[in-house]
Amino acid sequence: MSSARPLAALLLLIPLALAHEHHTEDIPEGEAVSAEPIDTILWIHIVIQILAWGIVFPTGMVLGIVRSRWHVPLQTLGAILAIVGYFLGHAHGGRQFAPNVHSKMAGMLMFMLIAQVAMGVYLRLHLEKGWNGKVRRWVVMMHGMMGKAMPVASWVQMLFGGITALGFCRDDHLGQCLAHFIMGSAFIGYGIILTILLLVGQFWLRRTGRSQEFFDSLLIAAWGCVNTFTEHRWGGPWVKNDLQHTSMGIVWWCAGLLGMWLSRRRDGTPKRNLFPALVIMLTGWGMSAHPQSLELSTHVHAVFGYTLMAAGAARIVEISFVLRDRDAISETDMEDTNSFQYLTPFLLYTSGFLFMGATEEQMALLATAHVSHVSYILLLYSISFLLFLFVSMLLHLYASHTWPLDAQPKDRPDQGLNGHVGHVDRRVRDAEEFELEGLMSEDEGTGDSPTGSGRRKENGRAS
């Protein structure tokens, strides 16, 4: 508990930071930021928060899922960094900002952090008598749910931070910004989900009794319905690209319904199909021909479209020729992957970054700075490589703890395919848990996981 004391002291100082007010008198009327450059303190704030929320906390989340003893120290480090960065965000000079969504979201994110720390401390106390026995189970569940939601909230906050730093996405630009950042994030999220299913999720997918295309088609159909009725203000005139955006929404829900129907055979077993990939290709083709006002924007949108078309084409090749309509390369080793299978998720990451980086204001800023589309696109591809690397490292960390290579043959997950269903269920349960070893009582640990005692012995300590 010694590591929690400095953290608690920092948490008590947060109200002082909340009471601080930014000076806005230097901001020109009608603008969102002042003309001064970003100072050193604010740059340190940016670096620390990216390190804490973008790297340390997600890594700690994975360590919590596998019940590693390093979960608490790493999350404590992340909390200290986040709080220090929060204070720095209220102590900077240089560029000043009008009231914005980033500062409002910061308070919500800090509240989530305080709640996570409080629940973690409560669980470490092992209070199990009386009403604590009933409350503890709910605290464990809430601790896990909030922990898994924090990476998504952190991603949104980091996007808000970049938008606020440049003073973008206000007034008439808001709608276009929402479309680019929401859809771009959706492509990246889709790529991350495909990576998870590819590397560690095949057993969960088999347990659902449905093909991956069923879930893909379901999301595509839902997203298409939203786009159909939100891309145009019904009752008003059709402006700019309203018709093209609305027609894309119609294509999505139509193809999504077809993909859902074709994802099962007559006997109810799952079946692969190509229609989600075809929708991705059609979307890429449509975006590659999207009319733009700037030459730079035209080039960036074209490459975005080509990248998305390549992702769809790669998915078609993977299902039809690499997997031959199977769920995985090997029916007995669900971890076996073909190198070609990495292409689709990576291209989806890149498509997301390209689309998020192609708003009107960003294109105008880059055109004014005489940045070529080649340099900009290569930079966005580089960011995609780094994100794919980080996601792959996290999944490797999870897999190496959940089913180590030196485990006995009877403990390997492929045994579940030969009729030992208990091993498959154990692995799926481990994938769904979010609680570190030591937070659960001895009864909870042995009741939730049949391998809990063995794992504690491997770590060399008793619970």
Image (cartoon, rainbow, N blue to C red):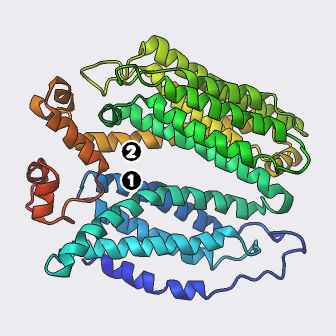
Q: Position of residue 371 (x, y in %)?
A: 81, 41
Task: Give the residue type that dot 1 points to.
Answer: Thr
Q: Position of residue 198 (x, y in %)?
A: 40, 31
Residue 86 is at least partly visible in this image: yes
User: In the drawing, does residue 154 fall left or right of residue 58?
Assistant: right
Residue 160 percent location from the top left of the image: 65, 61
* C-alpha distance separating marks 2 and 1: 7 Å
Where does the image place residue 421, in percent across and percent down from the top left?
A: 17, 33
Toward the front, the furthest residue is 266
Q: Residue at coordinates 47% horizontally, 18% vertically from top-left?
A: 319
Tag 2 near tag 1, CB within 8 Å: yes
Residue 408 seen anywhere in this rendered image of the structure: no
Q: Residue at x 61, y 23 (%)?
A: 278
Examine the image and state in which quarter residue 134 appears.
bottom left
Q: Amino acid at mark 2?
A: Leu
The image quadrant of residue 162 is: bottom right
Q: Label 1's element?
A: helix
Kindly identify which residue carries mark 1: 59
Asked whether, in this view, residue 371 is left or right of residue 145, the answer is right
Return the disc, 2 or 1, that comes first in the chain's sequence: 1
Rendered position, 277 above or below 168: above
In this orientation, which residue lies closer to the viewer: 327 or 386? 327
Quadrant where the C terminus lies?
A: bottom left
Q: Residues within 10 Å of mark 1 (few under 14, many from 20)?
A: many
Q: What residue does disc 2 label?
A: 394
Up-down relation of residue 151 to residue 267 (above or below): below
Check disc 2: other Cα within 10 Å, few if <14, some if 14-19, many if 20+: some
Q: In the image shown, does 344 or 84 lie closer to the viewer?
A: 344
Q: Is residue 240 above or below residue 332?
A: below
